[in-house]
Amino acid sequence: MANNGLIEVPMGITLREIIYDIGGGMPGGKACKAVQTGGPSGGCLLASLLDIPVDFDSLTAAGSMMCSGGMVVIDEDTCMVDVARYSLGFTQRESCGQCLPCRLGTKQMFDILDDITKGRSRPEDIDLLLELGEAVGRTSLCGLGQSAPNPVLTTIRYFRDEYEAHIQEKQCPADVCKMPSSGVS
Ligand code: SF4
């Protein structure tokens, strides 16, 4: 957004009002591609969902959450697989290690995402991420592990075509990832 910072808004305001009326819109005339709400373990919502109200139930129904109230607005030049990898890397490092699903599950998910963004993916990786994400979220002891898979599950839900391009064609549509054929280094 053009204007970054701390704001206080009423419950029920839409994401669009926050981004365009208060935030001043997207810099450089770029399109908004997604919004991650709730911090690094929040879900990434498709730009077509900008008119949903910001409240606990609506964000949860869309696959994200309110949590800290943090919001990251993502532009059209961003790779959503890389966003998932970055977000999960953060929560994986924050894991205290007490319970196995969070300690090892997030590590395994991160390694799969890292492989996908480096052109080392396997055809079954999307299904494996979905299975692991569901298990980690359901069986972790505290909110960190329970919410950590959100960025992965929502980027697969809303941007599955980007995962498929990385896995099947070994291409990063945003030309962000270090794919063997992309020349990005
Ligand atoms: S879910 Fe919570 S208790 Fe379990 S390892 Fe993660 S941070 Fe620790």
Image: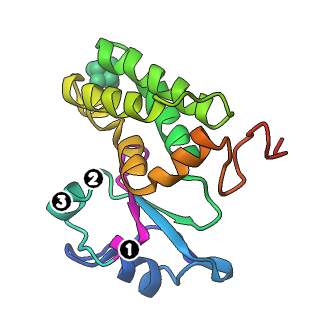
How dense is the environment of label 2, judged by Cα within 10 Å: few (below 14), some, or many (20 and up)? some
Tell me: residue 183, above or below residue 1. Answer: above
What amino acid is found at the position of numbered circle 1 in the picture?
Ser
Residue 169 position, x and y percent, is: 65, 44
Label 3 C-beta lies within 8 Å of the nearest ligand 1 atom? no
* Residue range of the region highlighted in magenta in the rendering: 37-50
**Location of mark 3 (residue):** 56
Residue 153: quadrant of the picture: top left
The alpha-carbon separation of the residues under discs 1 and 3 comes to: 19 Å
Callout 1 touching callout 3 (CB < 8 Å): no
In the rendered image, which residue does mark 1 sit on? Answer: 48
Left or right: 115 in relation to 105 = right
Disc 1 crowd rating (10 Å Cα; few below 14, some 14-19, many 20+) is few
Task: Provide the residue designation for mark 2.
Answer: 63
Q: Label 1: state its secondary structure.
A: helix
Residue type, label 3: Phe
Question: Is residue 155 at all visible to an observer of this figure?
Answer: yes
Mark before the other along the chain sequence, 2 or 1: 1
* Mark toward the start of the polypeptide (1 vs 3): 1
Which of pointers 3 and 2 indicates the residue nearer the eye?
Answer: 2
Q: Is residue 129 left or right of residue 110?
A: left
Q: Residue 48 versus residue 27: which sits nearer the camera?
A: 48
Q: Which mark is residue 165?
A: none
Which three-letter amino acid code belongs to the residue tagged 2?
Answer: Gly
Tell me which numbered mark, 3 or 2, is placed earlier along the sequence.
3
Q: CA distance from mark 3 to mark 2?
A: 11 Å
Give the number of marks: 3
Residue at position x 31%, y 12% in the image: 100
